[in-house]
Amino acid sequence: MDKQEVVDEVFHSVAEVAPHISSGLLKRREYVGEENPSDEKQLEADVWANEFLKEEITSLEGVGEFASEEEHEVTDCGEGLSVTVDPLDGSSNIPTNNIVGTIVGIYDEELPCRGKNIVAAFYVVYGPLTSFTIARDGQVDEYVLEESKGDGVELHKASEDIQIPEPYVYGFGGNKHWGSDFERLKEDISDDLKLRYGGAMVGDVNQVLHQGGVFGYPAREDAENGKLRLLFEANPMAYIFETAGGKSSDGDKSILRVKAEELHQRTPVFVGSEESVRKVNERGLSLH
Ligand SMILES: O=P(O)(O)OC[C@H]1O[C@](O)(COP(=O)(O)O)[C@@H](O)[C@@H]1O
Ligand SMILES: [Mg+2]
Ligand SMILES: [Mg+2]
């Protein structure tokens, strides 16, 4: 099987389970009393969506490894590409019915590895519409779930070859723990751009991808690598933004160049329009 066929299989298998994940949230909005490998409280929905996606993805031919934000270890499932998932991104938004999504990275290397090994990445937004934004073959396309039938889904291509526009909006996470350098950057950016922050990376980056600007979760005074995970969140989004003509940064270099030493390692993340991410890099914020 060629690599793009495997990418297609992974994309379609996630598209098929997406309506079930979205409708299954209703009864799974309680915390289960356990923590994930990043020491964050798990909702029943996090655990359930992970099981669902794991079963689908590990059964695909051409997938060699599966790793999830909700699991400690990589699962070996044969020969082929390595797939990472953040089954529910922004899951603390679930109890209040705000945006959540799923993030998938497809790497041509054993995990953990750098983002430069990504061959495709996509995210799902469970919003007013369920949408799928995928970077592969050098372009970013967006599909919207049109219909979910008994044995499959129909996707409508909503945008083709997305190019990130000039800066318009910004959203930065972790505001209770920003350092003074970052506070100054935020002041500069907020002079020109409009604040839009929803608390789920998928929703916030989706807005930036369509409207231009920058999303960031910087280093914090209490956590020098910030909150977001390199393999499950930062790399897939960086790949999507760089493919759409934007930029990514950990504070001074492309996220895709950050060395992956541990499966669940965190990194400061910035993705957005070229001009906005350049401003971030000029500050030299990286703590690496
Ligand atoms: O609540 P904060 O500190 O603003 O953090 C929000 C960030 O945390 C996340 O919810 C982390 O993702 P998970 O929900 O997958 O753990 C991001 O989606 C979001 O950008
Ligand atoms: Mg997440
Ligand atoms: Mg998650």
Image (spheres, rainbow, N blue to C red):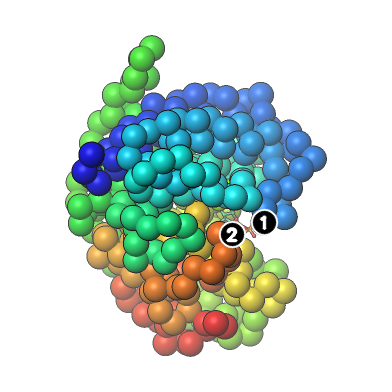
Q: Position of residue 257 (x, y in %)?
A: 39, 73
Is residue 264 shown above or below 127?
Answer: below
Residue 226 x/y as whole percent: 61, 69
Q: Secondary structure at mark 1?
A: loop
Contact check, label 1 and label 2, Cβ < 8 Å? yes
Residue closest to the eye, 225 or 92: 225
Quadrant in which the C terminus appears: bottom right
Indicate left or right for 36 with 208 as reference.
Answer: right
**As shown in the figure, which amino acid type bears the numbered disc 2?**
His
Left or right of 25: which side holds 76? left
Q: Is mark 1 within 8 Å of ligand 1?
A: yes
Mark 1 Cα within 10 Å, few/some/many (few <14, many 20+)? some
Q: Which residue is mark 2?
A: 264
Closer-to-camera residue (14/197) = 14
Q: Amino acid at mark 1?
A: Ser
Alpha carbon distance from label 1 to label 2:
7 Å
User: Would you identify the image quadrant in which residue 178 lies?
Assistant: bottom right
Q: Position of residue 10 (x, y in %)?
A: 35, 38
Image point (55%, 59%), residue name: 263
Pointer 1 residue: 38
Q: Give the residue at the far right of this rendering.
A: 33
Quarter of the picture containing the N terminus is top left
Answer yes or no: is residue 133 visible: no
First in sequence: mark 1 vs mark 2: 1
Packing grade of label 2 (10 A; few <14, some 14-19, many >=20) is many
In the current view of this chain or complex, which residue is farthest to the top? 150
What residue lies at 42% left-to-right and 87% top-to-bottom? 282
Mark 2 residue element: loop
Residue at 50% in and 54% down: 232
Q: Is residue 55 left or right of residue 45?
A: left
The reply to whether residue 245 is in sight is: yes
